[in-house]
Structures are given as C-alpha cells and as structure tokens.
Image (cartoon, grey):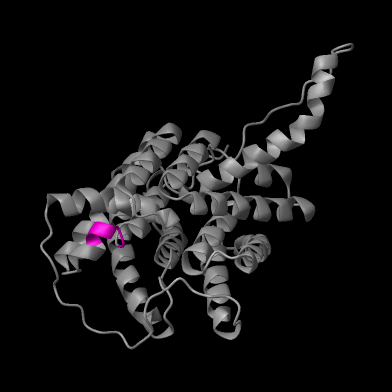
C-alpha cells in the first residue's frame, strides 16, 4: 500500500564513538525498537499513513473499544511483518509497514467472525503470514501496470480462511457473518436524523478496523490528523459522502448509523485525494466520483456475496481504486505526487 507520506526518510547510521559504552549497550535493543516501529507503521498503513504515531492512535482507539481486537491487531501485524523479515523482504518496505497492515486486518477479521479459542489464534498467525506472500505476489504482478496492492491480500485471505471453516469442525463462528441466502430487496427502514449521520460519520471511519464505536472513530480521525490534514479531511468527507449516498438511495437507517456505508468510501477518498494524486480541483472531483462509485459497489458486492454468507470487507475500495488509478494515465489533469 502506498503511503501518503514518503515511504521512509533516508537516514544514515552514525558510527559508534570509541568508548561510548552506553551506546554499545543500547545496540541490542535496536532490532526490537525497529520491529515495534514497523508494527506501528503497519497499523497506520491500514489507512495509507506511514506514521508510527498514527498507528499508535489507531491502536489506542481499538483497545478503547475492545482489548481482544487490540491484541489481534498486534499479533497479526507482528506475524506478517516477521514473515517478511524471515523471507528477506527489502528493509525499507518492512520499516514502512507495507507488510504489516494486511496482517493486522486479517487478524481482527478472523477474531471478529470466529470464536477466540487457542486454535483460532493459531489460525490467525498462519493467515497473517500468508498475507505477506500474497502481498509480495501482487506487488510483483502489478508492477507492470503500476497498480497498488492495497488491502487485496487481506480481502482474499480472509474470505478463503473464513470459507474454509465450513470444512473445519473445530473452528466456530461468532454468528456475525451475513446470513447466507438469495439477496432480498431492501425496504426503506427507519428515519435518518442528525444523530444517525453524526454517529455514522465516525463509525464509518472506525469500521475500517471492524470497530463500531464513535469514540474509536474520533481517535482514528485524530490519528489521521497527526499524519496529514488532507488525509483526515478526506476520510471524514468520504465517510459522510458514502452515508449521504446510501441515505439518498434508501439504505436502512441502522446500517447508515453503524457506518456500514462509510468505511470503504473513506478509504477511497484518502487514496484518491492526496495519496495517488496531487490535491487539486480535478482530483477532488475525481475522488468524489470514486466515493460515490464505491458506495454503489459496496451495495452490489454485499448482495452478490450474500448467497455465500460472506461480507464485502474492503473489496469495494480495492476494486474502485484499482480502476481509477489504472485509468488515470489518460487523464492529464490528474497528477501523481512527486516521488521521494
């Protein structure tokens, strides 16, 4: 996943001064602090931010809502990052958290949909490690088209590992998966008011990590603000726009309040307004179009996956951003950010 900020600043290791025994004793801790830094950046990269403080804010927000999910995020990020290190992935990519964020999301998803027993925790570690391989494969495959992998490794790993539970009798679901069956027409349900939109706005950001908590959403927004005012504004605007489109189309009030129509548009807005394109009037309108498309694609994929009893996850965000980034070379008014 490409970060809003540069992947990593160029830093040179200072030589060890002669006789500086304090520095010498500190050196054994450097791999540990570097690993912790990569974990926090990996958590931040879930929303395309290469910033350790942003990752820390996200982690605090998750722990505020659920200690279980907080530990899940730490385990998943650590497992996928450690796998990348063991396989010799470029250290700059590891340090930027590019091999951590999919593991974080897979871990929290599996512990959201599966009972948190000992076997499930082992299942989480395996799944998180697999996202590293999936990520490397997509980076290699997409390099010719200059497309980002985004959260595709998370989406496909989660869908496969959850579907596999139908044949694994010792893995038990939590009952939070969609009920399998043919899609049914939705009727307009509930009255959407200010409280619906206010809660849905921040729940939409929180739902990126499967969190349905307004305070968690506020903490996530503050984490984005630490890294980038543009990213924070884009996430809020994207979540709100997604809710408004869903409301205008007659989506159910409980789904709007829960942020179900906000998290994919929030991610799309961050990606298209400031990460992959320089912010200007054209890219802002392009991002708005992408947000509207993402809301529609989310509704479509939710219906398409309903017979399997599977959630759409962040697949709408992935598909829309892939399409909009792939199309951009033909749109000269869209300018990619300067490298560096």
Residue 207: horizontal and vertical position, in percent? 38, 56
Q: In this view, does 257 lie above or below 249?
A: above
- Closer-to-camera residue (17/61): 61
In this rendering, would 15 be left or right of 101?
A: right
- Taking the magenta stretch, the answer to whether it contains residue 258 is yes
- Closer-to-camera residue (69/340): 69
In this rendering, would 84 be left or right of 293?
A: right
In this rendering, would 24 be left or right of 108?
A: right
| Quadrant of the rendered image containing residue 225 | top left
Q: Can residue 248 be seen in this view?
A: yes
Residue 61: horizontal and vertical position, in percent? 43, 43
Q: Please name the predominant secondary structure of the magenta segment in the image.
A: helix
Q: Is residue 285 visible?
A: no
Task: Tell me what residue is drawn at x 42 percent, y 35 percent.
Answer: 228
| Quadrant of the rendered image containing residue 149 | bottom right
Q: Is residue 292 above or below residue 92?
A: below
- Closer-to-camera residue (36/236): 36
Looking at the rendering, the stretch of residues picked out in magenta corresponds to 256-260
Task: Tell me what residue is drawn at x 17 percent, y 68 percent.
Answer: 249
Q: Is residue 19 above or below residue 10?
A: above
């Amino acid at each position: 996943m490409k970060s809003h900020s540069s992947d990593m600043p160029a830093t040179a290791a200072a030589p060890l001064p002669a006789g500086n025994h304090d520095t010498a004793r500190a050196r054994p801790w450097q791999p540990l602090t570097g690993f912790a830094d990569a974990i926090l950046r990996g958590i931040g990269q879930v929303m395309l931010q290469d910033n350790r403080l942003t990752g820390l804010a996200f982690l605090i927000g998750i722990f505020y809502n659920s200690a279980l999910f907080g530990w899940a995020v730490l385990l998943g990020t650590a497992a996928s990052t450690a796998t990348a290190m063991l396989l010799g992935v470029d250290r700059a990519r590891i340090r930027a958290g590019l091999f951590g964020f999919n593991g974080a999301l897979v871990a929290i998803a599996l512990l959201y949909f599966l009972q948190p027993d000992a076997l499930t925790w082992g299942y989480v570690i395996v799944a998180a490690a697999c996202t590293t391989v999936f990520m490397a494969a997509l980076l290699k495959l997409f390099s010719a088209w200059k497309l980002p992998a985004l959260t595709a490794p998370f989406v496909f790993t989660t869908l496969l590992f959850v579907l596999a539970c139908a044949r694994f009798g010792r893995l038990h679901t939590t009952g939070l998966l969609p009920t399998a069956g043919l899609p049914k027409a939705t009727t307009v349900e509930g009255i959407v008011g200010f409280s619906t939109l206010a809660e849905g706005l921040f729940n939409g950001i929180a739902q990126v990590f499967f969190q349905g908590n307004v305070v968690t959403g506020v903490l996530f927004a503050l984490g984005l603000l630490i890294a980038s005012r543009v990213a924070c504004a884009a996430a809020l605007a994207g979540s709100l726009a997604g809710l408004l489109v869903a409301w205008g189309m007659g989506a159910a009030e409980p789904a709007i309040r829960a942020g179900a129509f906000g998290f994919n548009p929030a991610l799309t807005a961050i990606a298209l307004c400031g990460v992959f394109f320089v912010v200007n009037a054209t890219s802002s309108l392009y991002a708005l179009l992408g947000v509207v498309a993402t809301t529609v694609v989310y509704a479509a994929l939710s219906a398409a996956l309903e017979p399997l009893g599977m959630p759409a996850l962040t697949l709408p965000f992935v598909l829309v951003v892939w399409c909009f980034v792939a199309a951009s070379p033909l749109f000269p008014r869209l300018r990619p950010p300067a490298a560096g």
